[in-house]
Amino acid sequence: MARALGTVMAAHGRHYLVEAEQMLFNCVTRGKKSDVAVGDVVEYQLTSKNQGVIEAITERKTLLYRSDQYRSKLLAANLTQLFIVVATEPGFSDDLICRALVAAEAGGIKPHLILNKIDVLALLPAAVKRLQIYETMGYPVHQVSARTNPEQTLATLMPLLDGQSTILIGQSGMGKSSLINLLIPDAAIATREISAALDTGKHTTTFVRSYHLNDHSIIIDSPGFQEFGLHHLSEGMLERAFPEFRPFLGHCKFYNCHHHTEPGCAVLAAIQSGAISQMRHDMYEQLVHEAAQTLGYK
């Protein structure tokens, strides 16, 4: 049989749902390969009426993934945007936000911060204040309330999503599912269909899947997670993934400065002057430390 091109719409283990010509095919990879991501455009070959084998992955424009010292977890390919969903309650993690921003910067993907549940007025000022550090660095912050003000939420987000391939990530409890259900009214039905096709049963929140917002816009949903390892990024890649560091790179006394404790470090001087926040530099040092622990993927 001849090979055809399709787009991976969902992934669970080594099972993938591939869309081509408005039809869905349940595909696997050859051998034990599992290096396919949602959003990949793949060459596949049918083995029966609605099943096939993925033979090759076409060149990716972008790839978002996280990794620890043992293995990497692909999130999505060919993304243009990353929506980091946080909320007034429960409390959100600056650690996760910083890591997601670094991953986006390193991957050439535009990040946005979405502050949900702004109807919780007592907690709103504190949440807005915490996000100001990212806003001053140029990252857009959008305030919405998916459940109590769906019209305003749609008016805010739909123009941002149009013509884009966007993944939503966030900790559990931030209201990501409410946003997906608002943006994609048939998401629950689509998820059940995808689950049945991938035979994931009740584990519907443990896989990455994408939805068509319209003919030229895709939204990708990911499971809620608390950790975002970036062991695959080198020290040089990390320093460039902090945009507030960039004006000072190359101006240190030593050309191989690690921005740790070296004398004449322009980055450390910028922390003293307030141009770089201590919290962000602490995160940089943590990520460099983690990257040094890498033992290789298994």
Image: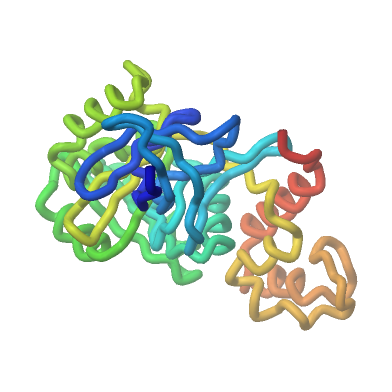
- In what quadrant of the picture does the C terminus appear? top right
Q: Is residue 246 left or right of residue 174?
A: right
Residue 130 at x, y percent in the picture: 45, 53
The image's colouring method is rainbow
Which residue is at a point 29% across and 26% down the rendered structure image?
197
Q: Residue furthest left?
A: 151
Write down the quadrant of residue 190 in the picture: top left
Which residue is at a point 40% across and 41% down the rendered structure image?
45
Q: In this view, does 3 lie above or below 209?
A: below
Q: Which residue lies furthest to the front in this view?
A: 1
Which residue is at a point 65% across and 71% down the rendered structure image?
245
Residue 253 visible in this rendered orientation of the protein: yes
Q: How many marks?
A: 0
Q: Is residue 95 above or below residue 160?
A: above
Residue 165 at x, y percent in the picture: 33, 58
Q: In this view, does 130 lie to the left or right of 270?
A: left
Which of 13 and 175 lies nearest the eye of the viewer? 13
- In what quadrant of the picture does the N terminus appear? top left
Which of 115 and 213 lies nearest the eye of the viewer? 213
Residue 261 at x, y percent in the picture: 86, 62
Residue 127 visible in this rendered orientation of the protein: no
Which residue is at a point 31% across and 36% down the rendered structure image?
25
